[in-house]
Amino acid sequence: MNWSEQQINTLIRKIYNGRYNALKLPKKLYNDIASHFTDGVYKGYGDSIATVAYDSPDFAMLSHLRENVYLFSAAKTFNYVLDTENLIVEGNEVLPFKVFKERALSVYSDYNKTWLETEYNTAIAQSQHARAWNDFDEDAILKYMLTSGVEHAQVCLDMQGVCKHKSDPIWIDKSPQNHFGCLCYLDASFDNKPTKTPSSIASPDQGFANNPGITKEVFNKEHPYFDVDPKYKKFAKTNFGLPLPE
């Protein structure tokens, strides 16, 4: 998602002027973020809603994954605007726009450049896992595999080489991805044999105790974006007043 300098400046000015706030979010920003993540879902899955049969498991999976990234995008937009809006007043004084803008640009860069890129890559990877899960035979024995040459979180090291039937509950919350940037995957080779469950397995990072093939979610409700102040809970239930795809 590449917004121009003019678009970013206009957005920041409208937040400063109160045109946008936590209860009145910028729909274009939301739609562009959601479209970006949807592109990631389609790229990872290897298909789009337009290219699969309406009554197929792939259509159902893609529909759920797309709706999930729209929900995530709404929560992301809400948190971004709220964090930016909170910069306007310092102490009991409204900051001059020039000072506010400098700080607001940093927040924009965090949410809509740095974090956005990581989240986009997550959408690709989680959708790849969801597609693989859909394609595994129901009686498959799956093996947790590490990609060589990269660093791995402790949960991945603990799971390395674990073989379990697809129906085993271990895959509910220990299936890749287990953290941002996780490059692990599940293998369904015919020579896999079930192994014992390790005596100790570290927990996935927050928001990653999730198998996208089962939940049909890229980002689950444990992600910090969904943890809103109680006064906004009712608003959050309306998808923060933003439309979902039809």
Image (tube, rainbow, N blue to C red):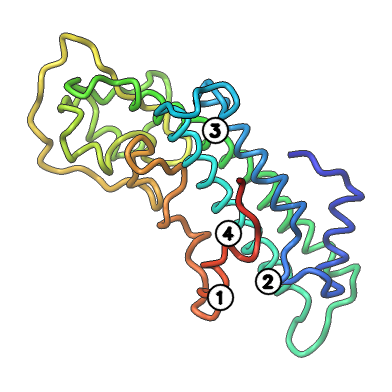
Disc on the earlier residue, 2 or 3: 2
Q: Is residue 77 above or below residue 186?
A: below
Mark 2 and mark 1: span between their CA atoms? Answer: 9 Å
List the single residue furthest toward the left.
196
Residue at image mark 3: 41
Mark-to-mark CA distance, 2 and 3: 27 Å
Q: Local crowd at mark 1 within 10 Å, few (<14), some, or many (≥20)?
A: some
- Which numbered disc covers residue 22? 2
Q: Is residue 17 left or right of residue 183?
A: right
Badge 1 is on which residue?
232
First-in-chain label (1 vs 3)? 3
Q: Report the side of 193 relative to 87 (left or right).
A: left
Q: Element at badge 2?
A: loop
| Amino acid type of the residue tagged 3 in the rendering | Val
Q: Secondary structure at mark 1?
A: helix
> 49 or 198, which is in the foreground?
49
> Which residue is rendered at x = 27% and y = 39% of the image?
174
Instruction: Point out the image quarter for the N terminus.
Output: top right
